[in-house]
């Protein structure tokens, strides 16, 4: 059950409205980072299906999937809802998260077997998420205003010219002393994040692949791969059937009615799924 606490927090690539106007240009690292966030924001709402595969010794050991719904509320808040599909023992569990610029996140879980909604504390970020190489902190990725930034230099990632920016968490409970985030120099999209533990040792590497952008919608990486630098094990997060501006209702993101949200047919493709209320 603890593994479900952060299911809906995974979309670190999705942030709220434009931050760039508030960024002082004297901090080059911060400006680059916020330009990247702006490339992946500016949607009214979205939904998608997400699968996660974990490979150990080149064999798939974990297989899970869930439906994901999100909407921006003003300039400083993102609301996200996750509904589990697989594995079967977690099917129907729901997780609701409110993420803020200047406040702690708020999160709730609905547990079908108990038929109750539970408010969840912001703890346990360092634990592995459902046996994967992602931790709770990795998939929650707090708002961009909750980090400090420092420009480190330039280099290449997969042959592309890139900027390297050191990102240090300004919130309590982080498992890392800092990250090094690599941004494409042409479009500012995040290419890779290196994670350093409290001892300053490189422990994990997250790469972003297969970026997609449709019409006026934000950029989204359709594949994210987390690699454990010690064991070599990897976890892949795969996004499918993304849709934007579908008119998701306020009631869908209500903590008071989280137990009422259901899917008309959970076996349907995400393009046909319509979250409703009893």
Image: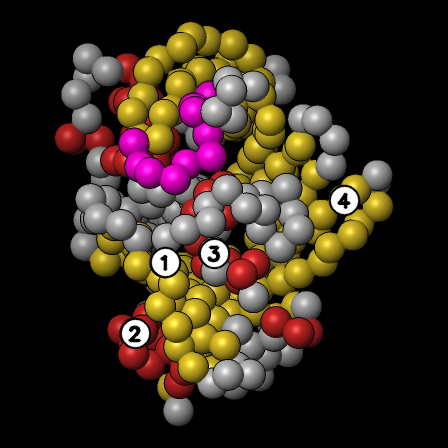
Q: Is residue 3 visible?
A: yes
Precedes in sequence: disc 1 or disc 2 = 1
Precedes in sequence: disc 2 or disc 4 = 4
Q: CA distance from mark 1 to mark 3?
A: 11 Å
Precedes in sequence: disc 1 or disc 4 = 4
Q: Which class describes the residues within 10 Å of circle 2: few (<14), some (14-19), or many (20+)?
A: some
Q: How is the image coloured?
A: secondary structure
Q: CA distance from mark 2 to mark 4?
A: 36 Å
Per the image, the residue denoted by label 1 is 121
Q: Position of residue 100 (x, y in %)?
A: 25, 50
Precedes in sequence: disc 3 or disc 4 = 3
Q: Nearer the viewer, mark 3 or mark 4?
A: 3
Q: Which class describes the residues within 10 Å of circle 4: few (<14), some (14-19), or many (20+)?
A: some
Q: Nearer the viewer, mark 3 or mark 2?
A: 3
Q: Is residue 97 visible?
A: no
- In the image, the segment drawn in magenta is 170-181
Q: CA distance from mark 1 to mark 4?
A: 30 Å
Confirm or deny contact between disc 1 and disc 2 (CB under 8 A): no
Precedes in sequence: disc 3 or disc 2 = 3
Left/right of residue 19 with respect to residue 141 in the rendered view: left
Per the image, the residue denoted by label 3 is 6
Secondary structure, mark 1, is loop
Secondary structure, mark 3, is loop
Per the image, the residue denoted by label 2 is 254
Q: Quadrant of the N terminus?
A: bottom right
Dominant SS type (magenta): loop
Quadrant in the picture for residue 252: bottom left
Secondary structure, mark 4, is strand
Q: CA distance from mark 3 to mark 4?
A: 21 Å
- Residue 55: which numbered mark, if any? 4
């Amino acid at each position: 059950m603890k593994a479900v606490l952060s299911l809906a927090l995974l979309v670190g690539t999705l942030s709220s409205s434009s931050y760039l106007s508030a960024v002082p240009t004297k901090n080059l690292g911060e400006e680059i980072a916020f330009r990247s966030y702006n490339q992946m924001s500016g949607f009214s709402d979205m939904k998608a299906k997400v699968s996660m595969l974990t490979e150990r010794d080149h064999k798939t050991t974990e297989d899970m999937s869930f439906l994901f719904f999100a909407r921006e509320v003003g300039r400083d808040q993102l609301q996200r809802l996750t509904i589990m599909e697989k594995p079967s023992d977690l099917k129907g569990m729901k997780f609701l998260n409110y993420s803020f610029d200047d406040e702690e996140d708020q999160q709730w879980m609905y547990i079908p077997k108990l038929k109750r909604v539970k408010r969840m504390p912001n703890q346990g970020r360092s634990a592995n998420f459902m046996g994967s190489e992602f931790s709770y902190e990795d998939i929650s990725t707090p708002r961009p205003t909750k980090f400090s930034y420092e420009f480190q230099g330039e280099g290449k990632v997969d042959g592309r010219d890139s900027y390297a920016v050191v990102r240090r968490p300004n919130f309590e409970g982080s498992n890392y002393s800092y990250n090094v985030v690599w941004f494409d120099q042409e479009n500012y999209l995040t290419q890779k994040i290196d994670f350093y533990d409290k001892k300053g040792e490189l422990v994990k590497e997250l790469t972003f692949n297969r970026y997609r952008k449709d019409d006026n919608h934000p950029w989204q990486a359709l594949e994210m791969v987390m690699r454990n630098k010690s064991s070599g094990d990897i976890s892949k997060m795969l996004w499918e059937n993304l849709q934007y501006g579908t008119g998701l209702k306020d009631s869908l993101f209500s903590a008071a009615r989280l137990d009422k949200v259901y899917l008309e047919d959970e076996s349907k493709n995400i393009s046909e799924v319509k979250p409703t209320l009893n």
